[in-house]
Amino acid sequence: MNSQSKSPLHIQSRWLHRLAVVVVCTTYPLIWVGGLVTTQKAGMAVPDWPSTYGYNLFLYPWQTWVFGPFDLFIEHGHRLLASLVGMLCIAMVIVAWRTEGRRWITWFAVIGLLMVIGQGLLGGLRVEADEVLMARIHGCVAPLCLAWLVYVEVISSRRWQNLSPAVGAPSAAAMTLHRWSFTLLGLTYLQIVLGSLLRHVTPMTLHSQYRVSVLFHVVTAVAVLMTMLLLAVHIQRHHREARNLVRLSRVGVVAVLFQFGLGISTWIFKFNWPEILPGKAYAPGLLIEAGSAVQAGIVTGHVAVGSMILAVAVVLVTYAAGYFPTGWPEWASEVRSMKGVVA
């Protein structure tokens, strides 16, 4: 039984979860808009920061922004959306501090705010320094911010608090669930890092180095696909009663398969038909003009779905921890007690 289910403080804390949902739903498009900025090479469309051509960020003439060049539109829009995410995170921390009885969740919300602030500073440094390395770091930290905010959304929800862990020593199925879910999370983020290396290429990058990066990216993509499939099969066989896990695993499989297709499409539409695949004679017209709307949509979609898969992996890991049997090991009992559950 949830010890705080009837307390006014616990009822008020529902607002934290609602706000956390809004934060996640705002942060996710921020990432793929940032991906579009990179795809369009619009990162320097506004050369100054934190101002916009000398104007206060929020006072920049909207006519110039909306009706100006597309590069300016998406870069300035990216900054405005990032500012909105920052303000929502501040509101989330305030709500958590005033309404959430479990202070550890409040501190997790604070960490989320600090990560968003740090990501904003990285974005500013990327503009000021105009260096590929800063762009890579900025691109790798963004999914981490999303992952942490998704985690805050899950642990502040009633569905996570109401999970019913097993009692006693963990079964082999529970241990496998943990291993595969954490493996999926690690491989998914590694894939995002490798993708960042491919998207932010310096003029000094050797062709052989790029080919190695592509190879690792493909190998990791296959590993993510196989891990997701194995995890989904395991959940279907051994955790069918956990409906949240079943639904999430199915969403994850669909997302990974779709992402695999987007990855192949990204390569074909950018570099033409791969030499290692059959059918090259039928592909001379597949190369699409660089910067076209079709190419930008496919590449940006690849970034967006990758972040979605990472979010699904975070939720799977968090649910797996919530279902972990009580009493073993010690941290599992602590997690259970932090959720406000009385054994």
Image (tube, helix red, strand yellow):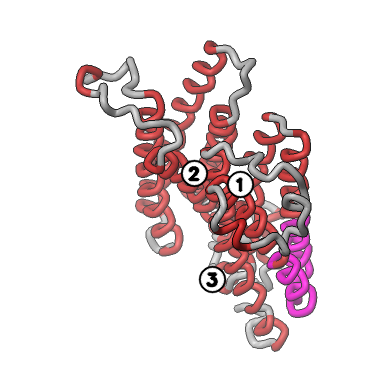
Q: Earlier in the sequence, mark 2 or mark 3?
A: 3
Check the picture and name the quadrant holding the C terminus.
bottom right
Specify whether 40 is left or right of 146. left
Q: Position of residue 274 (x, y in %)?
A: 34, 20
Q: Secondary structure at mark 2?
A: helix
Which image quadrant for residue 206?
Answer: top right
Amino acid type of disc 1? Pro
Which image quadrant for residue 280?
Answer: top left
On the image, numbered disc 2 is attached to which residue?
306
Q: Nearer the viewer, residue 324 or 81?
A: 81
Amino acid type of disc 3? Arg
Q: CA distance from mark 3 to mark 1?
A: 24 Å
Q: Is residue 339 visible?
A: yes
Q: Secondary structure at mark 3?
A: helix
Q: Nearer the viewer, residue 129 or 339?
A: 129
**How many neighbours does mark 3 have within 10 angstroms: few (below 14), some (14-19), or many (20 or more)?**
few
Numbered range of the magenta stretch = 88-114
Q: Secondary structure at mark 1?
A: helix
On the image, numbered disc 3 is attached to which residue?
159
**How many neighbours does mark 2 have within 10 angstroms: few (below 14), some (14-19), or many (20 or more)?**
many
Judge whether 277 appears above or below 195 on screen. Answer: above
The residue lying at 76 percent from left, 45 percent from top is 48
Would you say residue 91 sits in the magenta stretch? yes
Q: Position of residue 275 (x, y in %)?
A: 33, 15
The residue lying at 63 percent from left, 78 percent from top is 14
Residue 143: which numbered mark, if any?
Answer: 1
Specify whether 202 is left or right of 183. right
Would you say residue 32 sits in the magenta stretch? no
Check the picture and name the quadrant holding the N terminus.
bottom right
